[in-house]
Image (cartoon, rainbow, N blue to C red):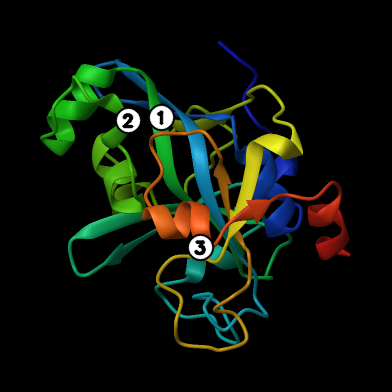
Amino acid sequence: MSKILSAEFHQRHSLVVARELLGCSLVRRLATGEELRGRIVETEAYTPDDPSCHAHRRNTPRARSMFALGGISYVYIIYGIYHCLNVVTQGLGEGAAVLIRAIEPLSGNATMAQLVQKDPANPMRIASGPGMVCRALAVDKSLDGVDLSSQQAGLWFEQGPSLPDQAILQTPRIGINSDPHTVAAPWRLIVADSKALSGTRRQNQGQAYQAQPDWFQKQAI
């Protein structure tokens, strides 16, 4: 087993965490003891000064977990049926998170395919999109607010190989259209050659550009 990412890993700016989560593994241990594992290939960063962030200017019951110290989960529901998994980032009371948008299955593929009712022969489409990630890993609201730096809740991150900037693309986030100042922000990070990405060809290629060295650290200052 690889090293579990510490809570301190997540207690940094959302952009830094979103970048460094790429290539790491997201692991879910089911009640049966089976472990489902996928490589993270797509993330989105959200910060409290971002109008598209659930925690922007307010602490609501829905977003309460976002105001915890970085390293716990924030699970919410969209369209009344789909769950989305985030890891809370930054400091206590700040209200920041990173959304996990897509993973490439590494183990437990057959179980993941069964959970999402997809063909196991095409594993790259099993967990493509935030709702699919949660379905494939059996993540729901019962896992909101759990410690992701521990195996206790059956959901955690494991360290992966460091990816060079040349392997990463930045794009605008998907579905953000309410605020003109944040629509074009390149806060969606993707592994360029992954076949498991959730976006369209235009979103993944036409609107994308290569990540620049140190860009993420500079944005976090």
Where residue 137 appears, as percent x and y from the top left, is 30, 35
What is the CA distance from the residue labelled 1 to the residue labelled 2? 6 Å
For the point 57% across and 84% down, which residue is it? 51
Residue with the most extreme front position: 206
Which label sits on residue 124?
Answer: 2
Classify 57 as above or below 53: below
From the image, tell me which residue sits under label 3. 65
User: Is any part of residue 137 visible from this angle?
Assistant: no
- Pair 1/3: label in front: 1
Residue drawn where x is 59% and y is 80% of the image? 182
Q: Is residue 191 visible?
A: yes
Q: Tell me the quarter of the image containing the C terminus.
A: bottom right
Residue 167 found in image quarter? top right
Q: Which residue carries the number 1 mark? A: 104
Could you say whether the residue bearing mark 1 is in a helix, strand or loop?
A: strand
Disc 1, disc 2: CB below 8 Å?
Answer: yes
Nearest the viewer among 106 and 83 is 106
Q: Nearer the viewer, residue 17 or 76?
A: 17
